[in-house]
Image: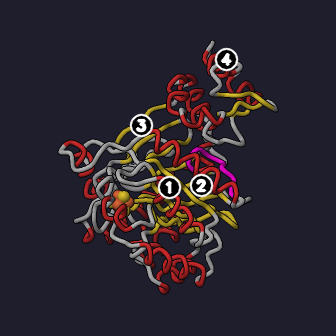
């Protein structure tokens, strides 16, 4: 079993004020009274993971995701970051990102979290169009976004990311362009653009069933994606991943860890992690999570007392994971020599005729020792990945 030389940390905060109509994330709207015990449990889980590592592992990125991490008080975030610094060696210049919902922050709040060492904010904007925000059942309006970004700048944040959603029922190419331009006017360093998927069990899925909304048109979504690519390229953004664009030098270092298939610890209810040859999932329910962390861990690093499920990654899975994650990186792609050095066989040997066929179909292309998705392959990336699974 190999030991990691460094890790990234994903810290899950499973609280929201209200559930959005499309959301199927592990988040809860009626557990605000658990924020204090949850903070204590998360600190314990961080300590357990650090102790299991047997050394203060260097950490080069931290990502507070949710849920709504910006519902946590600065004092709670401080305790969590202190636990990280005590149990791990947080590198100088480490990227520390916090997801935040516009409408949950003010100037004092972002100033306080900046002082704690958070140096990147990712705002869930989703749309600049009031009717789309209403359909998504987001609690904020676009003026809240404008204010939040202004406060972030005043507080000294020079790395701000905005999330937008396309493929929303009722959204047009024109309204999508309006949202993109409104977001660009705020001069973010990074944009994540996600295509809406309507998940079973969500209100939106019910509305689809009872005819309140029409299913999204995949051709329109493809046009929206293409429009975004053209507009962002004009503004100097680089598309470094299927859904992510940044100004030069500002990609999300944390998410690059996932896409390079490098080790990360998922801590907090429902978080997933991959390190030391294991993939694992932490128990989802916050009350159970808190209860479990009263106990001691029994597994090897990184399996804390809150881990509900895990398995050792074998060579077949590791090869598929490497391909599926690295192909998401549109510029970097998959390093063919590194793949062979790592697994003792070439990609073409490991996956038989699959890569050659995908190249023949124009979905992948090889160049400079790397395999990358083509423009056509980006639209059909799920089908490409499926062939390697
Ligand atoms: S804010 Fe995010 S996590 Fe919370 S309910 Fe909405 S989509 Fe889900």
- State which tag comes first along the sequence, 3 or 2: 2
Residue 126 in the image, given as x and y percentages of width and height:
44, 61
At horizontal 69% and vertical 37% (from top left) the residue drawn is: 333
The residue labelled by disc 1 is: 10
Circle 1/circle 2 CB separation < 8 Å: yes
Q: Mark 3 or mark 4: name the one nearer the start of the chain.
A: 3
For mark 3, what is the residue? 310
87 vs 199: above or below: below
Of marks 3 and 2, the one in the foreground: 2
Please state which of the two labelled residues, at mark 2 or mark 4, is closer to the viewer: 4
Q: Nearer the viewer, residue 322 or 196?
A: 196
Q: Residues within 10 Å of mark 3 (few under 14, many from 20)?
A: some
Q: Are marks 3 and 2 in contact (CB under 8 Å)?
A: no
Q: Which mark is residue 356?
A: 4
Task: Confirm if mark 3 falls within 8 A of ligand 1.
Answer: no
Residue 74 placement: quadrant: bottom left
Q: Tell me the residue that label 2 is attached to.
A: 254
């Amino acid at each position: 079993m190999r030991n990691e030389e460094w890790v990234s940390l994903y810290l899950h905060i499973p609280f929201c004020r209200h559930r959005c109509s499309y959301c199927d994330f592990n988040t809860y709207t009626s557990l605000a009274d658990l924020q204090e015990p949850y903070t204590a449990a998360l600190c314990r889980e961080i300590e357990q993971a650090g102790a299991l590592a047997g050394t203060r592992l260097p950490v080069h990125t931290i990502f507070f995701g949710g849920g709504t991490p910006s519902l946590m008080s600065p004092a709670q975030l401080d305790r969590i970051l202190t636990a990280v610094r005590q149990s791990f060696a947080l590198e100088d210049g480490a990227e520390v990102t916090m997801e935040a919902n516009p409408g949950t922050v003010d100037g004092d709040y972002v100033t306080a979290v900046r002082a704690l060492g958070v140096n990147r904010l990712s705002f869930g904007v989703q749309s600049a169009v009031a009717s789309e925000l209403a359909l998504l059942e987001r609690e904020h309006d676009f003026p809240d976004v404008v204010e939040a970004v202004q406060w972030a700048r005043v507080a000294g944040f020079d790395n701000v990311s905005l999330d937008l959603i396309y493929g929303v029922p009722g959204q047009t190419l024109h309204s999508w362009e309006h949202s993109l331009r409104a977001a660009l006017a705020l001069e973010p360093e990074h944009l994540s653009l996600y295509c809406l998927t309507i998940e079973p069990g969500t209100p939106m899925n019910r509305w689809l069933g009872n005819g309140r909304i029409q299913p999204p048109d995949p051709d329109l979504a493809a046009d929206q994606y293409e429009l975004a690519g053209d507009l962002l390229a004009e503004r100097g953004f680089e598309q470094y991943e299927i859904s992510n664009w940044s100004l030069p030098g500002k990609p999300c270092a944390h998410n690059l860890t996932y896409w390079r298939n490098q080790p990360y610890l998922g801590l907090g209810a429902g978080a997933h992690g991959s390190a030391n040859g294991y993939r694992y999932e932490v128990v989802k329910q916050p009350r159970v999570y808190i209860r479990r962390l009263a106990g001691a861990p029994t597994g090897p690093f990184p399996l804390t007392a809150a881990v509900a499920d895990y398995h050792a990654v074998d060579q077949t899975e590791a090869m598929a994971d490497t391909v599926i994650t690295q192909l998401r990186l549109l510029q970097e792609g998959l390093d063919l020599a590194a793949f062979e050095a790592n697994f003792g066989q070439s990609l073409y040997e490991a996956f038989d005729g699959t890569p050659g066929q995908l190249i023949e179909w124009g979905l992948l292309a090889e160049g400079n020792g790397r395999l990358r998705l083509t423009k056509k392959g980006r639209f059909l990336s799920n089908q490409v990945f499926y062939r390697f699974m």
